[in-house]
Amino acid sequence: MTATLEHRLPKSRQALQPGTIEARDFSFWYGKKQALNNISLIVPPSSVTALIGPSGCGKSTFLRSINRLNDLIPGIRHEGDLSLDGQSIFDKDLDVVALRQRVGMVFQRWNPFPKSIYDNVAYGARINGVTRSSELDEVVERSLRRAALWDEVKDRLRTSALGLSGGQQQRVCIARALANQPEVLLLDEPASALDPGSTQKIEELVYELKRELTIVIVTHNLQQAARASDHTAFFFSGQLVELGPTDQIFTRPREERTDAYITGRFG
Amino acid sequence: MTAIPADSAPKDRRRLAVHRVEIGDRIYEILTTACALVVPALVTAIAIAIFAAAWPALTKLSASIITSSDWDVGAGRFGAAPALFGTIVSSAVALVIATPLAIGVAIFLSEFSPRWLRQPVGFLVDLLAAVPSVVYGLWGIFVLIPMLREHVMPFLRDTLHLGATPFFSGAAYGPSMLAAGVILAIMALPYISAVSREVLLAVPRSQREAALALGATRWEMIRDAVVPYAKSGIIGGIMLGLGRALGETMAVTMVIGNRPEISASLFAPGYTMASLIANEFSEATSDLHLSALMAVGAVLFIITLIVNAIARWLVWQVSRERAI
Ligand SMILES: Nc1ncnc2c1ncn2[C@@H]1O[C@H](COP(=O)(O)OP(=O)(O)OP(=O)(O)O)[C@@H](O)[C@H]1O
Ligand SMILES: [Mg+2]
């Protein structure tokens, strides 16, 4: 099964563009429990890569490893390496805070701060020391426009983000992440708790955004993966079973287990 | 074998069972309702008793009981303004000292301390609430007051030059508003810290992760995501501590100096309403004197009610802010 990947690994490091994520023999443990087993893959820049697989197969673990959000959990351990633009994210010289500004993340359950829409979106800029209000206004407007939310909220920027609909709150979270101008955006089931209309908005947004940044999206919704992504990686009990162009994975999967999963025979 | 219809026994048992459940539910309902009614009934009864006993003094002395500083039992003048002042100031000093400390302890315990340290340190802090107040009073007399007199007061007044302000000027006798404030701070601290710790631990992980994923440092996460989210609960804890400080009697009586005077300086001795009542109640002979003490009690009662109302209002404000 690694053989299917060999052709995707670059011959030289020069092939890497900004926003390229690479995993090499990456394994991950929560205490004694191994959640990821020898993952090797490359996520190419300016594209959408979908992670699919049954519940508990390690999709979120992999995603949360990329911005080192798992660091908070006691007793974790990893082997192998993950790199962003050729630099290991476990490098001792790497500043985790800076890494998380380059790698934005949006969660399944939207989690705006109990503050105004404006303050939510301006948060990243503020902690980076931006205080001039003209500059903040600009960041907020630009980010909300990129998140396709500006027109809906421009008259109520100072009201609480929690007063918005679920889909709007999720887009506030996306705008908040975009305000940091990340190279990579990680989305962990961003639409699984949303109605179809909001889901569609998010999918369209993902499609727009991939021109500017690398997107990795975890989803249980296979149609969504098929519609929105360029590449699809199928995970199964901590292993990467297959990675390839989305249309190939969905029409001509190489692995029997992938076929079984996408045709709904298990999972 | 006797001729019992085959199905009658189980049917009876079922009917009995249904009956038993209904009665059980009913008894449970009556019991819990009764318990729930006892509390407000008790509070109302206490309030009525206090105000009835205070009535003669309230009608005779009216507002002078809280505006006048003249407390002369022989002459029948009962002005408890210094005690009211002392209650408020000593509690305010206590909060100023205890709040940052308690929140610091709570943040340490919920965010920084290793898991194994959380339990024992939390337990020790909680233990502060279990120490009898007379023990605090003794500690105040034998340890705190000498320390304040020899070191803290001269340091504040002379070394920091705070003596230039009216609040830290004058002679350092020891028994003082400051001593009372410090003792009350120690007594209020476990309440504020225990409540704050709980609400900080209850902040959802999604809020912490939201901040971290945006590139916040741990400290920024605590400041911007954790504490604001826990704000209403922390305010509730502070008000609980304030309630503790307002009503505390024994320890304060032992260290405040019991002098019914209003002074701007925290080094000066003072008085509190609770101390006043405790000191004079057993010796009160005239009916008016007794009634005046009851009136002081009624004022204290009202103040605690107001504090609680403010706490409710603040908590409500914060949670409404979150819901808009
Ligand atoms: N904090 C944790 N501590 C211990 N084990 C964990 C922790 N988080 C996840 N796991 C375990 O690691 C494995 C992978 O979990 P992960 O959350 O990555 O799965 P997932 O593919 O995202 O699943 P889902 O589709 O349900 O979100 C699971 O078996 C899970 O039980
Ligand atoms: Mg998951």
Image: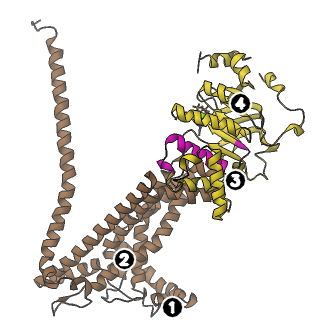
Q: Name the residue under label 4.
A: A37
Tell me what hue chain B is rendered in: brown
Q: Earlier in the sequence, mark 1 or mark 2?
A: 2
In the rendered structure, are the residues bearing label 1 and label 4 in contact, judged by CB atoms less than 8 Å apart?
no
Q: Is residue A173 magenta?
A: yes
- Determine the chain carrying the residue at label 3: A
Q: Mark 1 points at which residue?
A: B163
Q: What residue type is labelled 4?
A: Asn
Residue plotted at (72% across, 17% down): A253
Q: Specify the quadrant of the image occupied by residue A146.
A: top right
Residue B320, x across and y down, in percent: 41, 55
For mark 3, give the secondary structure: helix
Q: Are marks 3 and 2 on the same chain?
A: no
- In the image, which is nearer the foreground, mark 1 or mark 3? 3
- Determine the chain carrying the residue at label 2: B
Q: Can residue B117 be seen in this view?
A: no
- State how the image is colored: by chain
Point out the stretch of residues depicted in magenta: A161-184
Alpha-carbon distance for marks 1 and 2?
A: 27 Å
Residue plotted at (16% across, 93% down): B75
The tag on residue A97 is 3
Q: In this view, does A228 lie above or below B192?
A: above
Alpha-carbon distance for marks 4 and 2?
A: 63 Å
Q: Is residue A218 magenta?
A: no
- In the image, which is nearer the foreground, mark 1 or mark 2? 1
Label 2: how many residues lie within 10 Å, few (<14), some (14-19) or many (20+)?
many
Residue plotted at (42% across, 74% down): B94
Q: Name the residue under label 2.
A: B137
